[in-house]
């Protein structure tokens, strides 16, 4: 078989054998440049970035395919080539990062000619690894505080094994399920543990990714944006459903995804629904999401709910007898047919603790039943303005104080508490919350929420204030 035919055959074989993202990103534009040296195929790649990747990661796979097609053992050499009719304007389907890499390759070509045997390890040092902003993680969202019952132990185990072997078993790892079932808790547990293992991690709600991208485009710093997101070992994007309908975000996320995936980096996503129900998601992204492990986060069983209550009681050093705990965990689903979620359970628990502290008496079964009934009654919808109003009232302030710019006294802290509760109790995005708080930036909101989460972990006064307020808002009193 002549070399050109062997190459065509191998190329076709690789297309079948490799997954789509790998093939499209790294092999799509390869050509056979030269085969005049016996048993050596010189393969042309569009830029040094792709060439390094092929040498570093895909050499053996490609060599095997070529050797089989040529029916003899061949060696490969990858070289950068310029296509004859190179169009300096990027073709429409040129992924942004490929274009970037091409420009970079052009700049480097000169330097590389002088230092011709630049070592591979040096060359694969790209992309740049800028310092990452610290991920805003809730210190309480850790694996040891996540109760795994029989219904959710698979998801829990999968999350743990992602930490043990990032990017090897489950990539991407996609968790979906209703609100309040522990998706964010699990995602952040993975983040905490990966950080402890010195991995580069970004945990980010998808709305923040979008905002970051918009900022980068506006300030013409998209290269930095890409370096940041493509230099991580683990990228965790929460509430990915919010990228539905946002084309630019989807485009950029698609390329981020491909770049990370092909470099063997872990991607973890959470959503309120499975990929195929994400209506305005581009098909190619949906198929990427479905290409890994997609798992449903089920509502907690009664036993799990009781175990969660027991854990919280122990942490807070309060005692409830087992009958009370069972009542609190609820044996029936709610009137509207939805199973009880853990966030509601938290509300019930906080009420029980508050009620017990108030009366200084052990909580009886009828007391517990009352509290649960209160929660079971169809409740009002918690809105941003309601949270603002309640928070202001509770602290002797006005809503204007909270959304305004005064920072004196306790206003700033109270404002952050309001941000935290709005974020937790309403389904509004960070930018929307920022707008409601007098046009603050989403990063300010994130910072505020993070501050309060940390305070609550370390300071029981803050915790009591927030929990009391949350209980009142839930009750609508
Ligand atoms: P989601 O992201 O799915 O909406 P969260 O992760 O925000 O849900 O969980 C809501 C609350 O319930 C959090 O306080 C979380 O710690 C708690 N929670 C959920 N599931 C569990 C669990 N299995 N064990 C312990 N806490 C849980
Ligand atoms: Mg969540």
Image (spheres, helix red, strand yellow):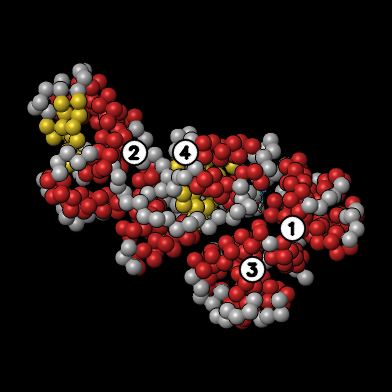
Look at discs 4 and 1 and give the one toward the viewer.
4
For marks 3 and 1, give the CA distance. 16 Å
Q: Earlier in the sequence, mark 2 or mark 1?
A: 2
Q: Earlier in the sequence, mark 3 or mark 1?
A: 1
Q: Residue tagged by mark 3?
A: 417
Look at discs 2 and 1 and give the one toward the viewer.
1
Q: Earlier in the sequence, mark 4 or mark 3?
A: 4
Count of numbered marks = 4
Q: Residue tagged by mark 1?
A: 347
Of the 4 image quadrants, the one containing the N terminus is top left
Q: Residue tagged by mark 2?
A: 22
Q: Residue tagged by mark 4?
A: 166
- Residue at 44% across, 48% down: 200
Helix, strand or loop for disc 1: helix
Quick check: 296 above or below 244? Answer: above
Helix, strand or loop for disc 2: helix
């Amino acid at each position: 078989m002549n070399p050109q035919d062997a190459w065509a055959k191998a190329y076709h074989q690789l297309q079948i054998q490799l997954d789509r993202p790998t093939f499209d990103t790294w092999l799509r534009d390869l050509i056979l440049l030269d085969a005049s040296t016996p048993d050596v195929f010189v393969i042309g790649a569009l830029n040094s970035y792709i060439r390094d990747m092929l040498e570093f990661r895909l050499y053996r796979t490609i060599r095997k395919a070529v050797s089989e097609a040529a029916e003899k053992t061949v060696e490969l050499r990858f070289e950068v080539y310029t296509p004859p009719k190179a169009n300096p304007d990027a073709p429409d389907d040129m992924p942004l990062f490929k274009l970037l890499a091409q420009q970079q390759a052009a700049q480097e070509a000169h330097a590389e000619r002088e230092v011709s045997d630049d070592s591979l390890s040096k060359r694969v040092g790209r992309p740049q690894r800028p310092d990452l902003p610290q991920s805003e993680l809730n210190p309480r969202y850790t694996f040891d505080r996540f109760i795994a019952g029989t219904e959710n132990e698979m998801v829990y185990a999968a999350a743990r094994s992602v930490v043990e072997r990032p990017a090897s078993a489950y990539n991407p790892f996609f968790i979906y399920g209703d609100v309040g079932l522990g998706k964010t808790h699990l995602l952040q547990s993975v983040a905490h543990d990966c950080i402890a293992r010195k991995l580069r991690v970004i945990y980010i709600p998808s709305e923040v990714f979008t905002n970051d991208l918009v900022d980068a485009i506006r300030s013409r710093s998209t290269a930095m944006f890409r370096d940041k997101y493509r230099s991580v070992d683990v990228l965790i994007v929460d509430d990915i459903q919010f990228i539905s309908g946002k084309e630019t975000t989807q485009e950029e996320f698609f390329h981020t995804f491909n770049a990370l995936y092909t470099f063997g980096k872990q991607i973890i996503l959470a959503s309120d629904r499975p990929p195929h129900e994400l209506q305005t998601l581009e098909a190619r992204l949906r198929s990427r999401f479905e290409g890994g492990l997609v798992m449903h986060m089920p509502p907690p069983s009664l036993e799990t709910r009781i175990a969660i209550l027991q854990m919280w009681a122990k942490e807070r050093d309060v005692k409830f007898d087992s009958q009370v705990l069972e009542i609190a965990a609820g044996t029936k689903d709610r009137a509207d047919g939805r199973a009880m979620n853990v966030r509601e359970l938290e509300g019930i628990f906080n009420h029980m603790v508050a009620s017990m502290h108030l009366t200084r008496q052990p909580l009886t079964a009828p007391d517990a039943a009352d509290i649960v009934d209160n929660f079971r009654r169809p409740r009002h919808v918690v809105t941003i303005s309601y949270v603002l109003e309640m928070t202001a009232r509770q602290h002797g302030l006005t809503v204007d104080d909270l959304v305004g710019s005064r920072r004196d006294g306790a206003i700033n802290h109270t404002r952050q508490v309001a941000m935290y509760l709005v974020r937790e109790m309403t389904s509004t995005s960070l930018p929307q919350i920022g707008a409601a708080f007098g046009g603050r930036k989403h990063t300010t909101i994130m910072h505020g929420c993070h501050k309060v989460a940390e305070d609550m972990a370390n300071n029981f006064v803050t915790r009591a204030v927030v929990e009391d307020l949350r209980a009142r808002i839930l009750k609508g009193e």
